[in-house]
Amino acid sequence: MEIKHIPSQQGQIAEVIGDNIFIQNQEDALNLMMSCLYNDADKLILYQENITPNFFNLKTKLAGDILQKFSTYRARLAIVGDFTIYESKSLQDFIRESNRTRHINFVASREEALELFGGLH
């Protein structure tokens, strides 16, 4: 896992990159978020492939628990991926509602995440 810091007009963005799943549970997400916050990045970009598939199954409550932590600590999050692969209507509703708040966002590309956060790309 690598954390790249990207300057933005509104502070630092942490882009978390890796080849494997490093968010398996709420504790993993909290530790990563706190590490980024400690390094002055209150906006995080994560990739769908680095998050356990259980996150996208709302019955596990993992997504809600993790996103609540981001809200509590006022850290913004963009998850980059192709969310059309999930047929769950409740997940699609969850994604739409999250995107409406603009605090937690599900986006299709890195560029979209950077634009959302005012990043320089």
Image (spheres, rainbow, N blue to C red):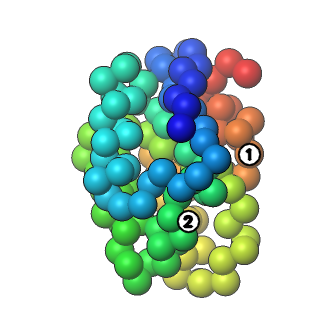
According to the picture, the residue beneath numbered tag 2 turns out to be: 95
Secondary-structure class at tag 2: helix
Query: Which quadrant holds residue 96?
Result: bottom right
Whether residue 94 appears in this view of the structure is no
Task: Give whichever of 16, 44 is nearer the camera.
Answer: 16
Indicate left or right for 29 with 17 as reference: left
Residue at horizontal 74 percent and vertical 36 percent from the top: 111
**The C terminus appears in which quarter of the rendering?**
top right
Lower position in the chain sequence, tag 2 or tag 1 = 2
Query: Residue 80: image x %, image y %?
Result: 65, 50
According to the picture, the residue beneath numbered tag 1 turns out to be: 109
Q: For the residue marked with disc 2, what is the amino acid? A: Ile
Residue at horizontal 73 percent and vertical 52 percent from the top: 108
Query: Which quadrant holds residue 61?
Result: bottom left
Task: Give whichever of 82, 76 is nearer the camera.
Answer: 82
Secondary-structure class at tag 1: loop
Residue at horizontal 63 percent and vertical 23 percent from the top: 119
Whether residue 17 appears in this view of the structure is yes
> Relative to residue 4, is residue 60 depicted above or below?
below
Indicate left or right for 22 with 74 as reference: right
Query: Residue 82: image x %, image y %?
Result: 72, 62
> Relative to residue 17, is residue 48 depicted above or below?
below
Mark 1 closeness class: few <14, some 14–19, many ≥20 residues within 10 Å: some
Query: Residue 17: image x %, image y %?
Result: 60, 38
> Relative to residue 13, is residue 80 depicted above or below?
below
Number of numbered tags placed on the structure image: 2
Task: Give whichever of 85, 95 is nearer the camera.
Answer: 85
| Distance from the alpha carbon under mark 2 to that under mark 1 | 15 Å
Mark 2 closeness class: few <14, some 14–19, many ≥20 residues within 10 Å: some
Query: Residue 22: image x %, image y %?
Result: 48, 51
